[in-house]
Image: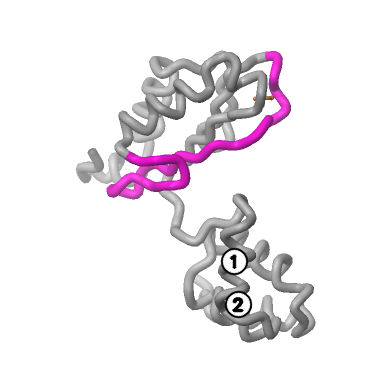
């Protein structure tokens, strides 16, 4: 496996050391790492000459930036108008209860991350949930629980026979 610090060094070389490049740099870091670690944030802040606290403010302002590592599977529930009117919030509440996390959080076993999104462009099939990039039209708790069970059973830990409840 490639050295992750080498990747960051290579990435920094591609960005001029100016504040206006902070967001692009953070996007690239997240794309590679799945989240923006403290060390990466520090390097990005130093490189673009944006104070660390300001860099954090930028990252927390944009919902698309993730500061914690994501779980193995991601469940996104759409809360755009059509989905909201068709039970999107009830799905969020149900999933929060089942997984014992709030949107934006990851389960303790790192299996699931729950998040909410605005319109995913499939309003005609609302409410919509997306599990690992797979769209679930007319989503219900029953359907999502079934999907969660399916992806959990296919996860590498499960295949190795290790518990992951
Ligand atoms: S509002 Fe959910 S897909 Fe458009």
Across and down, in percent, residue 22 comes to 70, 72
- Residue at image x 48%, y 73%? 38
In the rendered structure, does residue 119 fall within the stretch colored magenta? Answer: yes
Residues 14 and 116: in front is: 116
Mark 2–mark 1 Cα distance, whole angstroms, equals: 21 Å
Across and down, in percent, residue 164 comes to 25, 42
Across and down, in percent, residue 56 comes to 56, 69
Identify the secondary structure beneath mark 2.
helix
- Residue at image x 59%, y 29%? 79
Where residue 130 sits, quadrant-wise, is top right
Decide: marks 2, 1 in contact (CB < 8 A)?
no
Question: Where is mark 2, residue-wise?
Answer: 8
In the rendered structure, does residue 160 fall within the stretch colored magenta? Answer: no
Q: Earlier in the sequence, mark 2 or mark 1?
A: 2
Using residue 114 as the reference point, say whether residue 19 is left or right of it: right
| Neighbourhood count class around disc 2 (C-alpha, 10 Å): few under 14, some 14–19, many 20 upward | some
Identify the secondary structure beneath mark 1.
helix
Q: Is mark 1 within 8 Å of ligand 1?
A: no
Quarter of the rendered image showing ligand 1: top right
- Residue at image x 43%, y 22%? 144
- Residue at image x 68%, y 85%? 49
Q: Which residues are magenta?
A: 101-124
Total marks shown come to 2
Question: Where is mark 1, residue-wise?
Answer: 57
Q: Is mark 2 within 8 Å of ligand 1?
A: no
């Amino acid at each position: 496996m490639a050295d992750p610090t080498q990747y960051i060094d290579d990435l920094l070389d591609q960005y001029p050391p100016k504040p206006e490049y902070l967001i692009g740099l953070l996007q690239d870091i997240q794309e590679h790492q799945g989240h923006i670690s403290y060390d990466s944030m520090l390097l990005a802040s130093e490189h673009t000459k944006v104070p660390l606290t300001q860099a954090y403010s930028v990252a927390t302002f944009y919902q698309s930036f993730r500061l914690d590592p994501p779980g193995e599977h991601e469940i996104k529930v759409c809360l755009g108008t059509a989905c909201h009117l068709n039970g999107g919030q009830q799905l969020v509440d149900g999933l929060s209860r089942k997984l014992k996390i709030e949107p934006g959080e990851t389960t303790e076993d790192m299996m699931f991350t729950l998040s909410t999104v605005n319109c995913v462009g499939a309003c005609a099939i609302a409410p919509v949930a997306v599990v690992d990039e797979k769209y679930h039209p007319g989503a219900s708790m029953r359907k999502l629980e079934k999907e969660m069970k399916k992806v959990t059973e296919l996860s590498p830990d499960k295949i190795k026979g290790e518990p992951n409840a």
